[in-house]
Image (tube, rainbow, N blue to C red):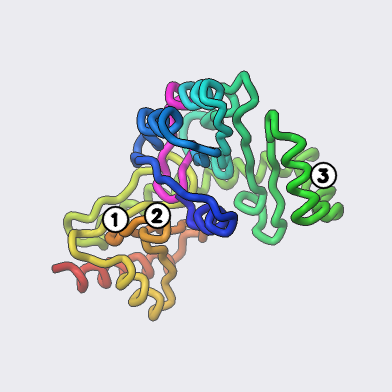
Amino acid sequence: CYFGTLWALEKMGMKIVEVPTAADVGVRVDDLEHLFKHGRVKAAVLHPNFQNPLGSVMPDEAKIRVAGLAKRYRVPVIEADTTADLYVSGSRPKPIQAFDRSDWVLSYGSFSKLVAPGFRMGYLAPGRFIREAEESLRAISLATATGPQLTLAKFMRDGGYESHLRRLRKHFQIQLPRAVRALGEAMPPHTRIGRPQGGYLLWLQLPRGVSSIEVWRLALREGISVTPGSLFSTTERYGSYLRLNLGLAWSAKVESAIRSLGRIVRQLSP
């Protein structure tokens, strides 16, 4: 999962238990149910749509099951719904909360991801935990600055936000396949490249024996930013994986960086 989530939970003194997750269908619900049934789970933190870093989307059937499990075992499910608006085909995938009839699912999103990082604003639909959410907000920051909230509210009310999202979706509809093709040409054989249906992240499995930490070090020397897979786990099992962020507009510089990244990986391949 997103390394910022791991850091936050660690600072809270929580014990983190990983649940197996697939790049095509997201979290494996059978494993999640086993933990709910046999463990002392305080909460589950999930990213069902265009998951960070895998780019996976949970099927609606799985989301329905998760909502049912939260109710049956009385375990809060906290879902990140931060990038679901960036679908590039079909329609917006539904959040888990859309199938929740018992208010055990808390859903949050971030305008920092979709509008501008400098806003540092998001939203939370806390379900039955509205009082706890209000108390936490007061304890952390008392309140959010009014000016930026009013600015964003006007942007949404006047249709600017929907227009902005349409442009973004059209952009990534072109950029994601282009990046996948460029990586396929640049990377050595036995590199596996994700095929996300939205968002702006790509998950790569490098050839056996290639260290993503070493790739990161060499790429950084050339001004190329990538994220080693080990940061997204509490284990050491993703040492040959990379996450790429494709949020920048496509350019000759981005294309050159992909070619350089492929050269680095080829150099490190056994």
Quarter holding residue 127: top right
Q: Residue furthest bottom?
A: 221
Horizontal arrangement in the rendering, residue 37 relative to residue 105 (left or right):
left
* Residue 87 seen in the current view: no
Secondary structure under tag 2 reads loop
Q: Which residue lies furthest to the left in this view?
A: 270
The quadrant in which the C terminus is found is bottom left
Q: Distance between the residues labelled 3 and 1?
A: 46 Å
**Residue carrying label 1:** 237
Q: Pointers 3 and 1 in contact (CB under 8 A)?
A: no
Name the amino acid, label 3.
Answer: Lys
Q: Which mark is residue 154?
A: 3
Tag nearer the camera, 3 or 1: 1
| Residue 20 x/y as whole percent | 35, 40
Instruction: Give the residue drawn at x 67%, y 41%.
Output: 163
| Residue 51 x/y as whole percent | 46, 44
**Residue carrying label 2:** 233
Instruction: Give the residue drawn at x 38%, y 30%.
Output: 34
From this view, report whether residue 224 is shown above or below residue 230: below
Horizontal arrangement in the rendering, residue 61 relative to residue 145 (left or right):
left
Q: Which residues make up the magenta segment? A: 48-63
Q: Pointers 2 and 1 in contact (CB under 8 A)?
A: yes
| Near-viewer residue (24 or 69) | 69
Does the magenta segment cover residue 4? Answer: no
Quarter holding residue 188: bottom left
